Image: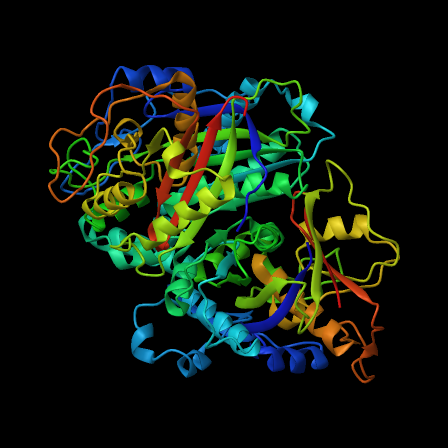
Amino acid sequence: MGRILPIAITGLGCLSGAGMNLRESLENLFLNQRNPRPPQRFSTDHPVSYPVLELRDEFELPLDQQETVYARTSQLALAAALEALHDAGWEAKDLRGKRVGVCLGTTVGCALNCDDFYRAYKEGKNPGMAVIERFLRSNPATVIARQLELDGPTQIVVNACSSGTDAIGIGASWLRAGACDIVIAGGADELARVTYAGFSSLMITDTEPCKPFDVNRKGLNLGEGAGLLVLEHKDVCQNKRVRGYVLGYGSACDAYHLTAPRPDGAGLKQAMNEAFATSGVKAEQISFVNAHGTGTPDNDRVESRVLHEILPGVPFVSTKGYTGHTLGAAGGIEAVFTLACLQRGELPANIGFSDPDPELPTTPVTENTRIEGDLALSESLAFGGNNAVLILAKGEI
Amino acid sequence: MRMAIQGIGLCGGFGQGIEALRTALQAGRVEPQEVCIEHQGGPEHFPAYRAVVDQLTEFIPKRALRRIDHFSKMTLLGACLALKDADLLEADRSRTGVVIATGYGALKTTFDFLDSYLDFGYSCSSPTHFSNSVHNAAAAHVSMQFKATAPSLTVTQFEMSVASALLSAQQWLAEGRVDQVLFGAIDEYSEVLHYCRQQFFAEGEQGPVQPLDFTIQSAVVGEGASFLVLTRADQTAAYACIDKVRLGNHQVRPLELVPDERLIIGADGHKECGRWYASLLKDHPVTAYAAVYGSFPAAVGFDLAVAALMLRDRKLYLDSEGDHSSPPVDLSPAEKLSCLKFGPGGDYGLIQLST
């Protein structure tokens, strides 16, 4: 396939275990600080306590009864959307009359896994519908559209852990097609007992702070958060500050296994090649890679080998040591970090990495590292064999 | 960009395959099955449009289906039937994208996973149920079964799932990321869903569904999978073309329809959604087919299949309100059809088709 039109990024917003907004997140990333701890918002009878990266503070939205109106994933999405729109210089009233789409990735945010409700149902206690009503109100894309009174397409991408990256690629395509003037795109996900139990059942969670790409890596730490971008067609954002561009997007499926990546990385390579083809960028132009880097043995092995083959010598980092694995939000948060790091000209150290794995042909940056250049790549791998890659550029091109 | 529909694969309360749908449309109404749930207080009987998937073993050995749940089986059957209908079962699928639209995902497996830890403790959580409860598991099964290595996408947007996912399928084709899209719309019935619907709608769940009476709650729960094989419209369509997909919110910016636009509406006996149709539709010729497949968010996929079939057959099959003693009305070659679905908050998806 050929080149596609670059789409401007005019605003960024994110919150996660790394920080309550982009500024605070970057501070903590470059101070190499993280705060994994046992989950505070829920408990289980699991004999092992796995550390997670929850938000450090509560957050307030301009909503009455925030906790009961919308599920936490939607609250996170709305908080990041408001930050991103503010960053882009948009007030809600100025969006009315424009075609504004919302394209978000999530996993927990759209799953009917209300376990307290279900326990009561199983016990024949005829539980009330308040939790279900909240679930039905809480589609994160619809929540943003409703709260901001937007008119345009809404979409929740549920491609597991590549959802956020795919949502940005898809949102950009809506702009190229003329379906919207502006798109709010990215991902959001909350920490939940269900995913905590699920990932521990798969035995891919670490009992200690995660160690992406390290020889002693044992698995991931779950996290929560949201990372959203304001995307605009270049005809709409004339005379505005443009933070960067979505230059390319590629996506491919391993068609191999439900939960494990394909060992030869064929799907990831195909997604990378599509991102290069659509952006017109060559591998040697990439300044750095924000890797998926979950800290699981399989993911990091495949990813390291593909990076060594396709982008030899290019610095890379996994920021999941700071945020945890935020599942459907990860691609959104990491796209935000990718562009912010490009603008700053610096990469944070890959926290958790200390000892190289002889099986991995390449290793991440071990300290904060100056970078040159305008282009970077952010990639996500997911259950279902999904692979998604974005190529982002900073500033004017 | 227009998309051409090259194949259709279906399973729902009316049966399996496009011929089963045509037969059901000719009859105008399908009687839902009687489902029985055992409670502490005794058995409860209620109607539901359930899908049977026994034809799947014609395509995939039973042994390979052992650990695959009902949601993914419906998905695989719809995909197999659509590829067979398009004569593409043996084709190279390295340029075939997979797009799945679902309102709720794999509900039964979601609750099976909860059962595993609620019944036996968190250390006994089932990894099989967990990995199959992830929304994109069904798409993954399709990609693995057919070696479809192009992009795969699963979308969930309640009633807007189908229209929203179609928008993305359209862009994949327009940008040349894929040469064809295996597009599926799936939802499944579950006992918990029935419990919730009963709490919300009480006796309205007993049917019979009367989709064009917007003043009453008459929805009957359904399930099924509807698959389309889509290509760019530079290839001649086997059925019809999807001209345009539009999503918005009628409350924020009122939807304006073309006068006399012939509509298949997604009204399915839900009063809360019905009010939007009532407020918008004046003299438009409308039909609704919920009495053939029941009520569920992804049923818009069946509306699309009905539209495509009618455009190919050039016949307007009457809905449950029509006089089925008369033959179907002929459609002219220039006739267009649109599928319109409203969500409870006034959000809408409008999909316009022509030959």
Q: Quick one: A208 or B115, which is closer to the camera?
A: A208
Number of numbered labels in the structure image: 0
Relative image position of residue B13 (x, y in whole percent)? 56, 74
Give the side of residue B218 with respect to residue B38, left or right: right
The residue positioned 37% from the left and 18% from the top of the image is A345
The relative height of residue B107 versus residue A244 in the rendered view (above or below) is below
Query: Which quadrant holds the N terminus of chain B?
Result: bottom right
Question: Which of the 4 image quarters holds residue B217?
Answer: bottom right
Question: Which of the 4 image quarters holds residue B230?
Answer: bottom right
Relative image position of residue B152 (x, y in whole percent)? 45, 55
Give the side of residue B120 with respect to residue B228, left or right: left
Give the side of residue B200 with respect to residue A293, left or right: right
Question: Which of the 4 image quarters holds residue B338?
Answer: bottom right
The residue positioned 69% from the left and 43% from the top of the image is B248
Q: Is residue A130 visible?
A: no
Relative image position of residue A299 (x, y in whole percent)? 25, 46
Query: Which quadrant holds the C terminus of chain B?
Result: bottom right
The residue positioned 63% from the left and 40% from the top of the image is A176
Q: Quick one: A302 or B40, which is closer to the camera?
A: A302
The relative height of residue A394 versus residue B120 in the rendered view (above or below) is above
Give the side of residue B295 with respect to residue B335, left or right: left
Q: Quick one: B48 or B95, which is closer to the camera?
A: B95
Relative image position of residue B254 (x, y in whole percent)? 78, 41
Q: Is residue B261 visible?
A: yes
**How is this picture coloured?**
rainbow
